[in-house]
Image (cartoon, helix red, strand yellow):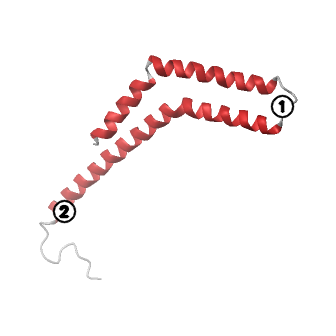
Amino acid sequence: MSRKQETLHKGVETMKNSRGWNYIREVMEQEIVSAALGMANNANMPVEEMHFRRGSIWAAKQLLELPEKLLLHLETQIKLEAADELNDATASFDILTKSSLRPGEGVDNG
């Protein structure tokens, strides 16, 4: 398994559970609510500003979801690497066990 992937996973997990991230999360959630209320309370808002606020809400939500997405990505990478290592070990074992075949065995001569 890749030590780098595991180290990154632990780092993201630590960041996600930190007081700093919790503060960022609180501020971003307040900003999302503020932007949504600003849209709801302004019936005469130009379409361009509505699109801008919708985009900023979307971006803020993406930022809030980033640690979970990174953790999922790293967990997937770790599992894929473990599966590759297992497949490599199995393939090596198959090669070793099949090398004891006598000439002509295991070959389809069609």
Q: Position of residue 7 (x, y in %)?
A: 32, 34
**Where is 81 relative to 59, above or below?**
below
Name the residue carrying label 2.
95
**Where is 4 relative to 13, above or below?**
below
**In which quadrant is the C terminus drawn?**
bottom left
- Who's the residue at 61% across and 31% down the image? 60
Judge the density around disc 1: few (<14), some (14-19), many (≥20) Cα neighbours within 10 Å.
Answer: few
- Which circle's residue, 2 or 1, is located before the other in the chain? 1
* Tag count: 2
Q: CA distance from mark 2 to mark 1?
A: 70 Å
Q: Is residue 97 left or right of residue 16?
A: left
Name the residue carrying label 1.
45
* Label 1: element kind: loop
Judge the density around disc 2: few (<14), some (14-19), many (≥20) Cα neighbours within 10 Å.
Answer: few
Q: Amino acid at mark 1?
A: Met
**Where is 12 relative to 26, above or below?**
below
Q: Amino acid at mark 2?
A: Ile
Q: Nearer the viewer, residue 20 or 96?
A: 20
Q: Picture quarter containing residue 17? A: top left
Foreground: disc 2 or disc 1: 1
- Who's the residue at 28% across and 53% down the image? 87
- Who's the residue at 40% across and 27% down the image? 13
Q: Position of residue 8 (x, y in %)?
A: 36, 35
* Mark seen at residue 109: none
- Who's the residue at 53% across and 22% down the image? 24
